[in-house]
Image (spheres, rainbow, N blue to C red):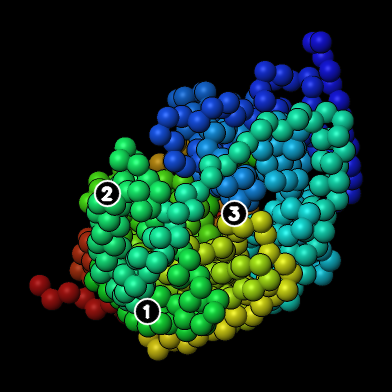
């Protein structure tokens, strides 16, 4: 049948969501068209029927693409075809991807591709629709998946929580939060907020999750009416003999590994353990339930990971003991510095344990704005953060081939955390770039970037609302028993069940991100994690305060400064001049940059404040003429028998009549003045033709020159 269209509808935050299937892309394993208020997103799912030879990981790929025809637009620039994904598209891919992974059955390794394409854009949020479409396609497909699950965006306007907020709502909202979850638990949280409390954040998360449960009911209905039977999947049976005997034989060696504090030393000890296990397996394969043809290197890797996983988790759950014996809520030692780079506008070095981030701040004007072209329009960001984590930061001998999706995600989280503490453009009209260079990494370099970035901004003289710090939390959970960890290491992240990052000032939360590796957590655990994270954040802020507590009062030498003045909008053309001649001359002569806005605001940026003041005074006089009674220092440009013409600013001259040169009678102006000489003059009159009459003697009588 060519068209077997079925529609499923629900009210989601006061807006009708339509999930359609059976009409488009029917050769995919599942395809849905998710629509809301003129926005339509096609989500397709394909999954390989067999696992590739040698496959030992789950190759899930989520793609998200905004088609410019969806908004009736052409792409800017030379290329008119959609190409590599933008940063914004990559961030949405990550948001869709992360909560899906823990819901695939353990051991499922078939290559799986989810592709979301925005085909039409109205006022509906394509980000939410892409997530809902991905959840729906997995629900009705034959792909094994422990759903249903869903996504919800939450805002808060005038103290009221809003589901599925519009763009206009978000501009007034005190928070923007994306929540993903199953019917039972929260799977992912990401967002930013205006320094809200932990209780407000939890309320918003619970609100989003409750609405996700309603969406899951719709997916149950879809699955019943149009869903395919799930394909059979039997996970590989673990070698029970191998693990039982390995735990007996290698636990003492593994315990020594977990007692090592330094990451590189622990990595070396882990490699030595793996080699020891490999040699033992190879020497006596039958004792471990293996054969002479087994891949002993691969089996040794599995055993090493499993032993360390079991021991580390048991130590935490049963003895409250972490790697190297650290307490559950203890933050590693912190060291901080500022002004570490001599010629940079602002810089800092933040070290927490074996995580170290160098941050550098650049301050400028309009030329530094970051342009982005999307289906929603062209935007210019005046504050942005770039995050880089080269391989040497984790001791890997690899070349650096550019920024990956993970780095874009981590940088975005740090940027959102700091953005909420930035001053308004009205009070601080600069473009600001923060570059965070991860020099060492062993646990939450993104939160280290928040701390280092905050200190570098204050070092540069940026008046933040308050210092911002971040902390990463972990979770170990077995059945009903659980422990929450503050400031997790890389190994604790790898072997744990949760990666939860929270950033903010002393007054509240500015950014949050949580990912689960198990099928979600309860509200109670989340509440406890928020409380423990606040304690960690306040501790880190206290350590940062030992170095810097507020912004520097003045910029460092060489930092450009901005001053603004206002002109009538109908005089913008006069300031710019024919073909931009006048404004170009002003910028070149005074070594400044001038940005003229439509409302008549003119921003002047330069290194020399005196030059900025001079060019503002000149522009004002060019447009409005000199002020009657004002005194200026002018340059004598021409001397005539009846007086001298004096430039009070370059290009704007007035006449000092012979009677206005000195108190005595002046017969020859050349006896008193010389071309090129600087003199003080007072404006007496500006006639209706714009001619300026000046007086020198009104300021100080000029003496006759001695010849």
Question: Mark 3 packing: few (<14 Cα in 10 Å), some, or many (20+)?
Answer: some
Tell me, yes or no, whether the two marked residues, 2 and 1, touch with CB atoms within 8 Å.
Answer: no
Mark in front: 2 vs 3: 2
The residue shown at (37%, 45%) is 290
Q: Position of residue 371 (x, y in %)?
A: 50, 44
From the viewer's side, name the closer residue of 310 and 542.
Answer: 310
- CA separation in Å, label 3 and label 1: 63 Å
Q: Position of residue 548 (x, y in %)?
A: 41, 84
Specify the label residue 282 is tagged with: 2
Provide the secondary structure element on which disc 2 rests. helix
Precedes in sequence: disc 3 or disc 1: 1
Q: Against 309, is 622 above or below? A: above
Mark in front: 3 vs 1: 1
**Residue position marked by numbered label 3 in the rendering:** 600
Q: Quadrant of residue 204?
A: bottom right
The residue shown at (66%, 33%) is 232
Instruction: Point out the image quarter for the C terminus.
Output: bottom left
Tell me, yes or no, whether the two marked residues, 3 and 1, touch with CB atoms within 8 Å.
Answer: no
From the viewer's side, name the closer residue of 448 and 594.
Answer: 448
**Residue position marked by numbered label 1 in the rendering:** 324
Tell me if I can see residue 296 in this picture: yes
The residue shown at (51%, 56%) is 412
Provide the secondary structure element on which disc 1 rests. helix
Q: Position of residue 576 (x, y in %)?
A: 48, 45
């Amino acid at each position: 049948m060519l068209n077997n269209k079925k529609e499923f509808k629900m009210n989601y935050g006061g807006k009708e969501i339509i999930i359609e299937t059976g009409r488009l892309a029917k050769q995919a394993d599942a395809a849905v068209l998710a629509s809301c208020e003129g926005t339509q997103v096609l989500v397709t799912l394909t999954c390989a029927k067999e696992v590739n030879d040698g496959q030992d990981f789950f190759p899930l790929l989520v793609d998200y693409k905004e088609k410019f025809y969806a908004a009736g637009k052409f792409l800017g620039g030379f290329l008119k075809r959609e190409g590599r994904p933008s940063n914004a598209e990559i961030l949405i891919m990550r948001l869709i991807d992360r909560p899906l992974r823990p819901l695939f059955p353990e051991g499922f390794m078939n290559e799986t591709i989810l592709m979301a394409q925005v085909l039409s854009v109205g006022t509906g949020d394509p980000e939410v629709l892409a997530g809902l479409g991905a959840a729906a396609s997995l629900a009705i497909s034959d792909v094994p998946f422990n759903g249903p699950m869903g996504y919800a965006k939450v805002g808060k306007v005038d103290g009221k929580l809003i589901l599925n907020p519009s763009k206009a709502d978000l501009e007034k909202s005190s928070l923007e939060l994306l929540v993903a979850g199953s019917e039972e638990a929260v799977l992912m949280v990401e967002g930013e907020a205006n320094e809200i409390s932990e209780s407000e954040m939890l309320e918003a998360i619970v609100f989003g999750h409750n609405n996700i449960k309603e969406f899951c009911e719709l997916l149950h209905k879809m699955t019943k009416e149009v869903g395919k039977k799930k394909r059979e999947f039997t996970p590989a049976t673990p070698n029970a003999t191998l693990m039982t005997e390995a735990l007996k034989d290698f636990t003492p060696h593994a315990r020594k590994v977990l007692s090592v504090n330094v990451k590189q030393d622990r990595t070396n000890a882990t490699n030595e353990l793996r080699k020891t296990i490999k040699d033992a397996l190879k020497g006596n394969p039958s004792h471990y339930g293996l054969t002479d043809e087994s891949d002993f290197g691969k089996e040794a890797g599995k055993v090493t990971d499993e032993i360390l996983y079991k021991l580390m988790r048991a130590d935490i759950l049963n003895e409250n003991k972490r790697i190297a014996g650290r307490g559950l809520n203890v933050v590693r030692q912190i060291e901080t510095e500022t002004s570490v780079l001599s010629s940079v506008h602002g810089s800092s070095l933040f070290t927490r344990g074996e995580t170290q981030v160098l941050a550098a701040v650049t301050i400028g004007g309009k030329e530094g704005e970051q342009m982005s072209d999307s289906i929603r329009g062209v935007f210019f960001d005046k504050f942005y953060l770039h995050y880089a984590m080269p391989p040497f930061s984790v001791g890997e001998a690899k070349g650096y081939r550019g920024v990956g999706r993970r780095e874009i995600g981590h940088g975005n989280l740090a940027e959102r955390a700091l953005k909420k503490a930035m001053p308004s453009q009205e009070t601080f009209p600069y473009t600001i770039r923060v570059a965070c260079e991860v020099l060492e990494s062993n646990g939450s370099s993104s939160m280290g970037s928040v701390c280092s970035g905050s200190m570098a901004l204050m070092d540069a003289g940026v008046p933040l609302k308050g210092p911002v710090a971040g902390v990463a939390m972990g979770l170990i959970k077995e059945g009903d028993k659980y422990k929450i960890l503050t400031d997790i290491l890389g190994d604790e992240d790898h072997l744990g069940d949760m990666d939860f990052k929270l950033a903010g000032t002393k007054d509240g939360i500015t950014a949050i991100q949580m990912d689960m590796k198990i099928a979600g957590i309860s509200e109670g655990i989340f509440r406890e994690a928020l409380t423990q994270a606040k304690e960690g954040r306040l501790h880190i802020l206290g350590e940062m305060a030992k170095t810097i507590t507020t912004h520097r009062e003045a910029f460092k030498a060489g930092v450009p400064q901005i001053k603004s003045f206002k002109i009538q909008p109908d005089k913008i053309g006069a300031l710019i001049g024919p073909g931009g001649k006048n404004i170009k001359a002003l910028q070149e002569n005074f070594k400044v940059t001038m940005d003229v806005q439509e409302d008549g605001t003119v921003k002047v940026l330069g290194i020399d404040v005196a030059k900025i003041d001079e060019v503002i005074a000149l522009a004002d006089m060019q447009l409005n003429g000199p002020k009657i009674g004002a005194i200026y220092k002018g340059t004598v440009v021409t001397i005539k028998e009846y007086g001298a013409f004096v430039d009070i600013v370059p290009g704007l001259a007035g006449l000092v009549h012979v009677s206005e040169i000195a108190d005595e009678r002046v017969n020859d102006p050349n006896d008193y003045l010389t071309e090129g000489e600087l003199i003080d003059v007072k404006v007496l009159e500006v006639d209706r033709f714009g001619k300026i009459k000046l007086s020198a003697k009104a300021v100080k009588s000029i003496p006759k020159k001695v010849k």
